[in-house]
Every structure is written in structure tokens, then in C-alpha cells.
Amino acid sequence: MIKTKKIAFLGAGSMAEAMISGMIHSNIVPAKNIVVTNRSNKERLLELENKYGVQTSKRVDLDTTDIDVFILAMKPKDAEQALSSLKPNITKDQVVLSVLAGISTAFMEDLLHEEQQVVRVMPNTSSMIQQSATAISPGQYTAMDSVILTKELLSSIGQVYVIDEKQMDIFTGIAGSGPAYFYFLMEHIEKAAKEEGLDPEVARAIGAQTIYGAARMMMERDETPTELRENVTSPNGTTAAGLKALEEHGGGTAIMRAVKGASDRSKEMSEQLEKVSNEA
Ligand SMILES: NC(=O)C1=CN([C@@H]2O[C@H](COP(=O)(O)OP(=O)(O)OC[C@H]3O[C@@H](n4cnc5c(N)ncnc54)[C@H](O)[C@@H]3O)[C@@H](O)[C@H]2O)C=CC1
Ligand SMILES: O=C(O)[C@@H]1CCC=N1
């Protein structure tokens, strides 16, 4: 079913590219059925055209009539203008997905047609290699068929979880922003390795394999993270020393604060955007 659907990206930045890459490489969505738009940066569109074989056009020149799914991928601050200018060119039965942090389905519904089909989506940049953890929350008028279509489409970029919209902020704190925490962790592993005389590039390969192995253990073994951690930790051994240093320097608290900080910011962005839109 998905092979015949036409998908339009409104926004051609890093998140749009990550999704396009995942979709094309999955072979679920043919490149000729994807059209990518932005406001004015022609070079960027040409770059995506050459890299992925997708169609491109300036947003204002997009023929919206035969598009089945729109994917909003601009910055949250540009959402209101983008939704308002989309409304006259679509019907309520076309499905509008948004990957914008802090933009609620209610916000989208308010700016589009009565009973518009909308879905809030939170992917992450691992979409690029089809390894995103992506959440979706359908709006109140979205038909079950459209939810199934959305799930099928986004399964091309990784695992898809249908969640209650109230959980979207914490999902964003864990998965939307999450890759950055692991990159930050790696930056510090490389720093420590360098100080000990190990080539940072070698350290990166070793560290990445270690993170990948630990992730697969959590996914494939029927053991909790606590059990898995305890299995690594010999009494008075090296791991115990590492974990003690981590705790002494607030490692556990820092991780919790990071997740909650991102989640709180997602909530705050929703509140600010809704306030601005109510004042307008
Ligand atoms: N970067 C990430 O890891 C993630 C980003 N997101 C969300 O994705 C969205 C985009 O993020 P990035 O790709 O990092 O931003 P970006 O700044 O790289 O790209 C934004 C794009 O939107 C275009 N644009 C602005 N207004 C437009 C309009 N009316 N019509 C068509 N195109 C328009 C810009 O020209 C640009 O191509 C944000 O809302 C963010 O919350 C969600 C999950 C993860
Ligand atoms: O930093 C941000 O706001 C976006 C949303 C999740 C990841 N990047």
C-alpha cells in the first residue's frame, strides 16, 4: 500500500534528510514518490535531489493535490505560518504529520480544517540508518487507516511506538534528544582515552562497539539493566571503581537531569507556542 503513496516534506533540514535517507534505503518508499520542499534554498534541494533521487520544489510551487502524506519538518517557530499557508491547499482527508518538538495535535487541528487528520511524530536522527525510536500520537480526527499508514511509513526509519500524547515530552527527553547524550558520552570517552595515550579514533571504535553491545544485551536478553550492570561488576574490581567515580561525580543524577531537562523544555515549548498563537 505504501509504495503508491505520495509523501511531501515541508522543510529540508537535518531531520528531514535523516528521514528521507532511511525511507529510501528501506526500499519501502520509492524515491520518485517523495517530494522535498523548503522556502528558498535551491542549493539544498539540489543536494537532496542528487543524493537521494527525490523530487524537489520550492514550498510555494508544490502541487499538493496528489499528496497523501505531508511531513512538517521546519523549526517549531515556523509551524504556525507553515500550517496556515498549507490549509487552503489541502483537504481534511490528507494526512499531516509533524515531527516538530512541542507542537501538539490540538495546535495543528486549530490551524487546519475542521476534522483534519493529523499525527504528531517524534523521530530521532538515527532515522538516517533506519534505527530511529519513533513515537506517534494521532489527533482526534485521524482514521485508523491513517494511523496504520503512518506506522507503516515510519517503520521504514526504525521502530515505531504509538503513545498517548501526554507522554510525548518524556519520549522526546529519552529518544528525540537521546542520541546526543550518547554522542556526548563518547566525546568524553575519547578525551579520557587521549589523556591515557590511546588514539581517539581507536577509542571511538572501541567505545561505539561497547555501547552497541550493551544496547543489544538490553534488547535481546531477559535481564534488567541492574542485573546486567551487576554481572559486569566484580567485587573491588575495575568496574566498581569506575561506577564509584561516576556516582561521586553525580553521573546518575546528571543522566536523570538531562532526560527531565529535555522533557521539561518540550513542555515549555508547547506552552510558549500555544500562548503566542492565542495572543495572535
Ligand atoms: N534534529 C533532530 O534531532 C530532531 C528534530 N526534530 C524536529 O525537526 C524539526 C526540524 O529540525 P532540523 O531539521 O534540525 O531543522 P533545520 O533548521 O535543519 O531545518 C528546517 C527546514 O525547514 C525549512 N522551512 C522553514 N519554514 C518552512 C515552510 N513554511 N515550508 C517549508 N519549509 C520550511 C527551512 O528552510 C529548513 O530547510 C524541528 O521542529 C525539530 O523540533 C524532531 C526530532 C529530532
Ligand atoms: O533539540 C530539539 O529541539 C530537537 C527535538 C528533539 C531533538 N532535537
Image (spheres, rainbow, N blue to C red):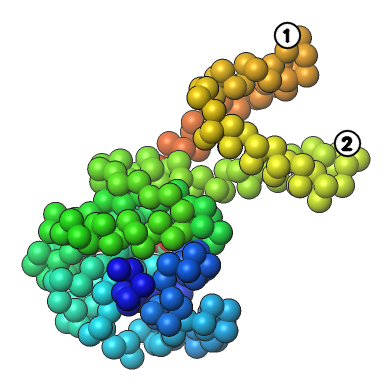
Q: Is residue 11 left or right of residue 241?
A: left
In front: 69, or 37? Answer: 69
Q: Which residue is mark 2?
A: 196
Name of the residue lying farthest toward the top: 235
Relative vertical location of residue 129 with respect to residue 59 in this rendering, above or below? above
Residue type marked 2:
Glu
Residue type marked 1:
Pro
Q: Position of residue 280 (x, y in %)?
A: 18, 67
**Ligand 2 closer than 8 Å to the CB at disc 1?**
no
Tell me if label 2 and label 1 are in contact, CB under 8 Å. Answer: no
Quarter of the image for residue 67 reads: bottom left
In front: 40, or 156? Answer: 156
Q: Report if residue 269 is visible in the image.
A: no
Name of the residue lying farthest toward the right: 197
Q: Residue at x 24, y 57 (%)?
A: 147
Q: Which residue is mark 1?
A: 235
Could you tell me which secondary element the residue under label 1 belongs to?
loop
Q: Position of residue 27 (x, y in %)?
A: 48, 69
Name of the residue lying farthest toward the bottom: 61
Quarter of the image for residue 233 reads: top right
In the image, which disc is placed on residue 27?
none
Relative vertical location of residue 278 with respect to residue 20 in this rendering, above or below? above
Q: Residue at x 8, y 67 (%)?
A: 114
Relative vertical location of residue 187 with respect to residue 84 in this rendering, above or below? above
Q: Residue at x 50, y 24 (%)?
A: 222
Q: Quadrant of ligand 1?
A: bottom left
Q: Is residue 119 left or right of residue 26?
A: left
Q: Position of residue 60 (x, y in %)?
A: 32, 88
